[in-house]
Amino acid sequence: MIRSLLVANRAEIARRIVRTCRDLGIATVAVHSDADAGAPHAREADTAVRLPGDAPADTYLRGDLLVKAALAAGADAVHPGYGFLSEHADFARAVRNAGLVWVGPPPEAMEAMASKTRAKEIMRKAGVPLLDAIDPAEATADDLPLLVKAAAGGGGRGMRVVRELDALPAELDSARAEAASAFGDGEIFVEPYMEGARHVEVQVFADTHGTVWTLGTRDCSLQRRHQKVIEEAPAPGLDEELRRTLAESAADAARAIGYEGAGTVEFLVSPAGRAYFLEMNTRLQVEHPVTEEIYGLDLVALQLRIAEGEPLDAEPPAPRGHAVEARLYAEDPARDWRPQTGIMHRLEIAGPRVDSGPADGDAIGVHYDPMLAKVIAVAPTRAEAVRRLAHGLERARIHGPVTNRELLVRVLRHPEFEAARMDTGFLERHLAELTAAASDDDEAASLAALAAALADAARRPGTATVAGRLGGWRNVPSQPQLRSYRAEPGGTEHEVRYRLTRDGLLAEGMPDVRVLGAEAGLDATPGRAAAPGRVVLDVAGARRTFEVTAYGDRRYVDTPRGGHVFTALPRFPDPTARAEPGSLLAPMPGTVVRVAEVAVGDRVEAGQPLLWLEAMKMEHRVTAPAAGVLTALHATTGRQVEVGALLAVVAAGE
């Protein structure tokens, strides 16, 4: 029996494992980097052990330190979660050699699937259908498009889609470099890239007594940069024959390597309905909650019982209903998925299940994955589950870094997604429309900006209401009050002009808007127009409520129809806050991982890559803003930079 478990991970999955252990009566040990010293997973475990440093390479990727921590804290088992060392056979061996229980598959099974090239050889012998690899030296235009993939690791690192043969050599080099940096293994391979295909996977569980379960299917086709964004179970629109093929192939894959514990076999499903083996993840998946919800199982508890040697039932329970999960990321989809950092002041999502990493007040840094939370909705039908998830996200209170919340809501309400007509290219194909500011949002943003201005007026010292600030209805200023805000992200500026008259508040450009006060029974204070945290407007006869929260110069305006974020602009901008023309400023905090072979004085072309930044486990290419001469280069490999740091300067022209 496991009595004390060390969780060799952080954030959401660590909290998830701790929660199950608490229910099972198992004591927990957390590990934390210096950056995570105050993180929820470290606070919620019974014991916490410090891993000195911030970077993953110095902390969560140090197997020796993790084993030492488990022994020092008196743990008798280790659960790796997902990511980090969860699929490293050597770490699993080190745990076992230390006399600890490894909550995962045998190291030999992990090694068999660690290399995608070797895994495909094993699957071919087991009769599992798969795509044939292509020798890049012999690739022709007829083979296009191609997919370059890292043999080790996952998460979209070291993966490139090639649509022009001339671009293949450069993409091969780039993929090798990224794979070597991310996984310590630069091996890559090339296979056909299937347009319009879906990413479908099967959850498997195997005990130590020979029983193998397949727990239905999950569709994970909604991806950005080959990383999943929305997942659901069961995968919609598959006929029974295809479902049977997927289940049998997944079970064959598990048996072929003597698998034990939780694993996921991933497939590519062609538009014609044929399945091809992609890879097997020898761990718990991020998207496991959708399977839990429809099968009524705790998959972490199941992992622990298998590790203790308990047998599975002969057959798994029958599934019921439909579940959909959305990953909430700290990123800006409209700006090349740029990761975002800062303080998460408030993260409140009511209704659906939420598995989150940070708590209110936590700092979101650059060292780790940008995922903030997983939001899961379950219902009897797919349509109901999708609607519940969109509604829950729309009403969420998310006060902190920019997130992909709006994109998630728009995807869930997109006609193609609602009709289950999605594939791995969905987000790339629809990104422009999903991130564009819709025309019907203009009024909503303007009203939200007005609400922010009224709340700011009520927030000024010495008053709690707009009417009080202006001396009631009798002391009426002759000139309109002016406030300016910049919408985040996007940068659209909203100039709000309003004034109080004997007939109430008038907002320029909004003739049908008035502030509701005591006369509407909303407050007992005479003449109350707005409070610092709440503004109620009558818009053409319809009552609209706005909750306004301020943190420094940021204003978060929440409504039942979605949230808005503004930066309050000063009346007089700082004239020194300008950069030299052609300056390349760091778009995010991160580490320079590569610098192109260029030197000061070289001529560069518009869009030419100059350097690569790594932040939140993703690489971001920084390119020349225009054709010209490189007049300064301040970036060096390994340098850590803050957002706005000057990296290079390109003087446009000849």
Image (cartoon, rainbow, N blue to C red):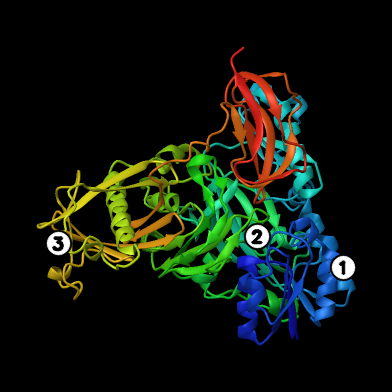
Residue 244, position in %: x, y?
A: 57, 58
Q: Is residue 134 visible?
A: no
Residue 259, position in %: x, y?
A: 75, 65
Density class for disc 3 (Cα within 10 Å; few <14, some 14-19, many ≥20) is: some
* Secondary structure under the numbered disc 1 in the rendered image: helix
Q: Is residue 571 visible?
A: yes
- Tell me which residue sits at (46%, 55%) in the image: 236
Q: Do the residues labelled 2 and 1 touch (CB within 8 Å)?
A: no
Q: In which quarter of the image is residue 628?
A: top right
**Camera-side residue of 364 and 550:** 550
- Tell me which residue sits at (74%, 86%) in the image: 3
**Camera-side residue of 350 and 490:** 490
Density class for disc 2 (Cα within 10 Å; few <14, some 14-19, many ≥20) is: many
Residue 606, position in %: x, y?
A: 59, 22
Density class for disc 1 (Cα within 10 Å; few <14, some 14-19, many ≥20) is: some
Mark sitting on residue 264: 2
**Camera-side residue of 94 and 356:** 356
Q: Nearer the viewer, mark 2 or mark 3?
A: 3
User: Which residue is the site of mark 3?
Assistant: 473
User: Which residue is the site of mark 1?
Assistant: 94
User: Does residue 519 appear to the left or right of 202 in the view shown?
Assistant: left
